[in-house]
Image (cartoon, rainbow, N blue to C red):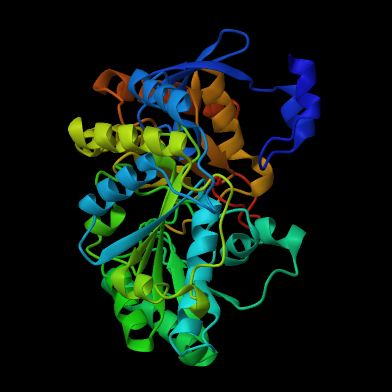
């Protein structure tokens, strides 16, 4: 089966190098996956941050199988289906009363793309047709479709497809570990917010439709914005008539220890994008949640042409919705977000112990079971190792050799295991990482390296 790998394109990977040492998975059980050669690995990324309820989850599999026997497809341009209506009702019951309408789709890129389209159409239908620009952050990732790529903030993902659609403006990444100016920690949020405000002023608020952001910027390196930043964005958007969109494709459904990151940051957007954990990774499923104010602009007579003029073949698919119902119910019933809090704290405590003996581990950050580890040559200056050293890649390969799958760049490692993980399994991840770190140190990769300034590569991609 290894030979067939040459004929398959894998996301974001150079196929030549992948084909030399391919990973071909066949089975999964709990937090583990098994490859074609029978080797077992801990899935330290929950697939792509979505297999949050573990592999081989019988309840989710049975929900999908039962629905397949009933109805596999409901023409989304002509009808909806009972499973979709049940899922919408369930989600609205978990959300604040400010939300009233949900559009179900089949992937994160579809959700973020639709949210930005909805924002532009909303302004056109409410007398503000000049509002079309979309603000987003550098180093962010919002998906792989046209507008989603344009909103994303890493040049390596954008450059192959430029020129992209116009009207997309980027903001500084609100990174408290690496602020752009020498400011006191308590002033970091205010500094970033002032930069946002200046961008709004210089772009002309009358032309800005929306600001889209991840509450925790995963592909920027699991960046948790400084205290007050998201609330400040909410205030700026309200002041200037800009819609606030939260991309919670990764951060919702227990990943950060709450059903929604918006709860943790006490900030709710006008439009909320959901996905990944919504189905536990068992079916392609995403959602765009609209506040009442936004939804009202799309309600009218057919002759008014105010309906949302976009859709996708597998939107609100009954099989995906049936699995989504089972996944969300399981998350609530089994108090899975609380387990994410406990195990995330255990994981980061163990990583901090490993950091004490390893000066090249610069920062450990995260919430719930989304954790980032940043590597540095010097903790004081926070200078990174040169990209050509490939430190992160070496750690990834060493971990894989010992039975753990993680995502890395040359400066970052990310862990996001299934939310069902137990104490002993968390400890096993830590033991494997410690051994992998030692393997890399023994190879000399963390020894003093030339002081070479290298451009950042994206932190591990989200996949949409």
Q: Residue at x 75, y 24 (%)?
A: 5
In the image, is residue 191 above or below residue 309? below
> Of residues 444 and 116, which is closer to you in this image?
116
Q: Position of residue 332 (x, y in %)?
A: 21, 37
Q: Position of residue 417 (x, y in %)?
A: 39, 31
> Of residues 30 and 199, which is closer to you in this image?
30
Farthest top residue?
Answer: 38
Asked if residue 151 can be seen in this view, the reply is yes
Q: Position of residue 388 (x, y in %)?
A: 69, 45
Judged left or right of residue 285, residue 87 is left
Asked if residue 447 can be seen in this view, the reply is no
Q: Residue at x 39, y 40 (%)?
A: 277
> Of residues 235 and 358, which is closer to you in this image?
235
Q: Position of residue 236 (x, y in %)?
A: 34, 82
**In the rendered view of the protein, which quadrant contains the N terminus?**
top right
In the image, is residue 235 above or below residue 383? below
Q: Residue at x 37, y 26 (%)?
A: 63
């Amino acid at each position: 089966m290894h030979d067939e790998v040459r004929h398959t394109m894998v996301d974001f990977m150079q196929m030549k190098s992948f084909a030399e040492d391919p990973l071909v998975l066949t089975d999964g059980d709990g937090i583990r996956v098994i490859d074609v050669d029978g080797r077992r690995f801990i899935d330290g990324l929950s697939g792509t941050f979505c297999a949050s309820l573990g592999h081989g989850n019988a309840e989710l599999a049975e929900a999908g199988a039962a629905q397949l026997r009933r109805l596999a497809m409901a023409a989304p341009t002509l009808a909806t289906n009972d499973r979709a209506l049940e899922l919408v009702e369930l989600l609205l019951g978990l959300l604040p009363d400010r939300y009233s309408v949900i559009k179900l789709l089949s992937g994160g890129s579809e959700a973020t793309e639709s949210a930005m389209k909805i924002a532009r159409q909303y302004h056109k239908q409410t007398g503000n047709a000049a509002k079309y620009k979309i603000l987003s952050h550098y180093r962010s990732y919002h998906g792989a479709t046209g507008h989603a790529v344009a909103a994303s903030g890493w040049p390596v993902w954008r450059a192959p497809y430029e020129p992209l659609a116009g009207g997309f403006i980027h903001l500084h990444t609100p990174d408290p570990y690496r602020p752009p100016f020498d400011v006191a920690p308590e002033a970091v949020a205010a500094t970033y917010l002032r930069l946002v405000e200046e961008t709004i002023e210089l772009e002309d608020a009358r032309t800005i439709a929306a600001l889209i952001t991840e509450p925790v910027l995963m592909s920027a390196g699991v960046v948790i914005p400084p205290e007050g930043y998201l609330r400040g964005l909410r205030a700026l958007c309200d002041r200037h008539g800009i819609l606030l969109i939260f991309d919670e494709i990764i951060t919702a459904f227990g990943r950060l220890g709450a059903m929604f990151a918006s709860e943790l940051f006490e900030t709710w957007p006008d439009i909320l994008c959901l996905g990944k954990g919504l189905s536990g990774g068992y079916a392609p499923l995403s959602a765009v949640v609209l506040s009442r104010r936004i939804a009202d602009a799309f309600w009218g007579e057919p002759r008014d042409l105010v309906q949302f003029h976009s859709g996708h073949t597998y939107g609100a698919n009954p099989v995906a919705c049936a699995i989504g119902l089972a996944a969300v119910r399981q998350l609530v019933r089994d108090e899975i977000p609380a387990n994410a809090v406990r195990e995330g704290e255990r994981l980061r405590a163990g990583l901090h112990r490993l950091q004490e003996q390893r000066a090249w581990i610069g920062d450990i950050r995260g919430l719930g079971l989304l954790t980032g580890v940043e590597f540095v040559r010097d903790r004081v200056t926070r200078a990174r190792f040169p990209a050509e050293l490939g430190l992160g890649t070496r750690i990834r390969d060493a971990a894989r050799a010992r039975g753990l799958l993680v995502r890395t760049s040359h400066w970052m490692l990310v862990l996001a295991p299934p939310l069902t993980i137990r104490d002993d399994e968390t400890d096993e991840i830590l033991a494997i990482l410690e051994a992998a770190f030692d393997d890399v140190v023994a190879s000399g990769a963390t020894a003093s390296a030339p002081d070479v300034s290298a451009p950042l590569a994206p932190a591990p991609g989200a996949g949409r």
